[in-house]
Image (cartoon, rainbow, N blue to C red):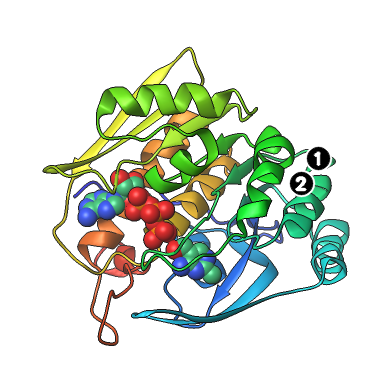
Amino acid sequence: MVLPPRIPRPSHDGSAPVRVLTVAGSDSGGGAGIQADLKTMLALGAHGMSVITAVTAQNSLGVQGAWELPAEAVRAQFRSVADDIGVQAVKTGMLATAELVETVAALLADLPAPVVVDPVGVSKHGDPLLATEALDAVRTKLLPTATVATPNLDEVAQLTGVRVESENDQRRAAGALLGHGPRWALIKGGHLPGGEAVDLLTDGTEEHWLRAPRHDNRHTHGTGCTLAAAIATYLAGGYEVPQAVTAAKDYVTGAIAAGFPLGAGIGPVDHGWLREGTD
Ligand SMILES: Nc1ncnc2c1ncn2[C@@H]1O[C@H](COP(=O)(O)OP(=O)(O)OP(=O)(O)O)[C@@H](O)[C@H]1O
Ligand SMILES: Cc1ncc(CO)c(N)n1
């Protein structure tokens, strides 16, 4: 297991820690969404802050209900954080509706900080977390704000029409996604079969294949949220994109290996896995 680095914390000399903002939905089960993001940011040494876009009643069996917040509530939360505390990187997750996608994209357009867009479409259980009519706003408004976009295979198919069944297809999907404006595309291969979990990171010039052992652990709820939040944290810490994604991959791989059962279905990854014996 490769131990990922942590962002250095100030030695209590009064300087502020790295500050990272998640703009995402709440997962009552604690395994995905803002809960996963804030745990990840803390585990890697950052101060995590949140703009909640939607509330889901969710557990290891799926999503039993979802309620989006008014756009004004999203704008107000964002302003409260950006105007007083300051934001060094942003991660976006569940945005639920076209109106919220456009609202968040407008807020991000004026923010001089790196943005990781996890274009959340459906939960691991297949429950919809984004209205179909919001896809166009994701393509035309949100993706152009992204430093890195991190779709899984279903999401990249929805956004680009490219069905990924091989590493070659990951290349094609990345090219199609880059056409919508993100600086980097990370095509996650978690849903592909095989002994490794292989992701492709590319900006159209550089190509990085990130490989890790596939852990046959069914407790993988929130893997994508965790990866994207880790990438944003490392970017906030000053890492370049390839290095941030590599370190984040190591973090999520360890969190999956340490995943645990909760409830009768798919349990969460263990965001606190770094605590054991590495302090
Ligand atoms: N069983 C596994 N073993 C190791 N790595 C995995 C496994 N499943 C997924 N991954 C890795 O976890 C990261 C997240 O990918 P995944 O495809 O699971 O995202 P996702 O479907 O968006 O997750 P979620 O919707 O649950 O947040 C990727 O780096 C992927 O390669
Ligand atoms: C709130 C929320 N965001 C994202 C995901 C992705 O799995 C989820 N299941 N729930």
* Number of other residues with Cα within 10 Å of mark 2, as a class: few under 14, some 14 to 19, many 20 or more: many
Q: Disc 1, ligand 2: is the CB inside 8 Å? A: no
In the shown orientation, is residue 101 left or right of residue 177? right
| Residue 10 in the image, given as x and y percentages of width and height | 60, 56
Describe the element under mark 2 as helix, strand or loop: helix
Q: Viewer-proximal residue, 231 or 43?
A: 231
- Of tags 1 and 2, which is closer to the observer? 2
Q: Disc 2, ligand 2: is the CB inside 8 Å? A: no
Q: Residue at x 30, y 61 (%)?
A: 255
Query: How much space separates mark 1 and mark 2, taking CA atoms?
Result: 6 Å
**Callout 1 touching callout 2 (CB < 8 Å):** yes
In the shown orientation, is residue 194 left or right of residue 46? left
| Residue 222 in the image, given as x and y percentages of width and height | 40, 64
Q: Residue 43, relative to residue 193: is it above or below?
A: below
Q: Residue at x 24, y 43 (%)?
A: 192
Task: Give the quarter of the image for residue 212.
Answer: top left
- Residue that badge 1 annotates: 109
Residue 36 appears anywhere in the view: no
Q: Residue 56, relative to residue 106: is it above or below?
A: below
Kind of residue at disc 1: Ala
In the shown orientation, is residue 80 left or right of residue 249? right
- Residue that badge 2 annotates: 105
Describe the element under mark 1 as helix, strand or loop: helix
* Number of other residues with Cα within 10 Å of mark 1, as a class: few under 14, some 14 to 19, many 20 or more: some
The residue furthest top is: 205
Q: Residue at x 61, y 30 (%)?
A: 182
Q: Viewer-proximal residue, 215 or 71?
A: 71
Task: Give the quarter of the image for residue 131.
Answer: bottom right
Kind of residue at disc 2: Ala
Q: Residue at x 37, y 64 (%)?
A: 124
| Residue 82 in the image, given as x and y percentages of width and height | 82, 57
